[in-house]
Image (cartoon, rainbow, N blue to C red):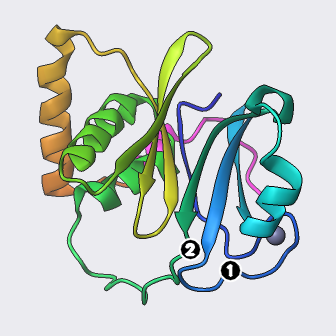
Amino acid sequence: MNDWNIQSRASVCAACGRPFADRQPLHTLLFDEPPTLRRLDVCQNCWQDQFSDGARQRKGFVSYWQGLFEAPPPPADPIQRETAETLLRKLIEQNDPRHAPAGYILAVMLERKRVLKVKEQIVHDGRRVFIYEQPKTGDIFTITDPELRLDQLEAVQRDVAALLEQGLNPPAPAAVPENQPIAPS
Ligand SMILES: [Zn+2]
């Protein structure tokens, strides 16, 4: 499984395809489908018809909760300064394993500030995985515990502080593999 990812709340029911209305109840299920946890948002009717009966094991989902659909907020100001949340999103997007410990610390910080809520903790391939929800947007953040040792913590916290202050630098050109064929223009 990927160590981390973000999955947004769907705007339509995954089963019947009807769009969700603002404040409509919806049911979120997570299925363990390597390499990732697949998210499914379904409406009340489809939940009752297709998923609610029977054991979780039989239906194959590893996590489930009920929530409300919230109409998306207007687009954010593009020049807002880096916050712990925007930084975490960028780290996950870049998917650089070197930043995985920083991502984990950011998620913990955001949980303390009540920006993210832990919905579930599961064990996957022997590792602890936290499933967070950003309640305003409904986005799910899947973060694998990097199992930091105490003597690593200080360096990671310094890394996080520097990232928050300076932002995430774009990947250095040196990171591009050598001998990569150049696409014809
Ligand atoms: Zn439906």
Q: In this view, which residue lies farthest toward the bottom?
A: 74
Chain part drawn in magenta: 171-183
**Which is nearer the eye, 107 or 99?**
107
Q: Residue 85 falls in which quadrant of the image? A: bottom left
Q: Is label 1 in a helix, a strand or a loop? A: loop
Residue 69's disc is 2
Q: Is residue 89 above or below residue 37?
A: below
Q: Is residue 20 above or below residue 89?
A: below
Residue type for callout 2: Phe
Q: Is residue 177 magenta?
A: yes
- Name the residue at 17% across, 11% down: 150
Q: How far apart are marks 2 and 1 (CA)?
A: 7 Å
Q: Nearer the viewer, residue 73 or 50?
A: 50
Residue at mark 2: C-beta within 8 A of ligand 1:
no
Amino acid type of the residue that numbered disc 1 sits on in the rendered structure: Phe
Q: From the viewer's perspective, is residue 122 above or below residue 10?
A: above
From what the image shows, is residue 39 above or below residue 77? above
How many other residues sit within 10 Å of disc 2, few (<14), some (14-19) or many (≥20)? many
| Quarter of the figure that contains the N terminus | top right
Residue 178 colored in magenta in the image: yes
Q: Earlier in the sequence, mark 2 or mark 1?
A: 1
Give the image location of residue 177, x and y in percent.
60, 36
Residue 20's mark? 1
Tell me the residue at 19%/35% (across/down): 159
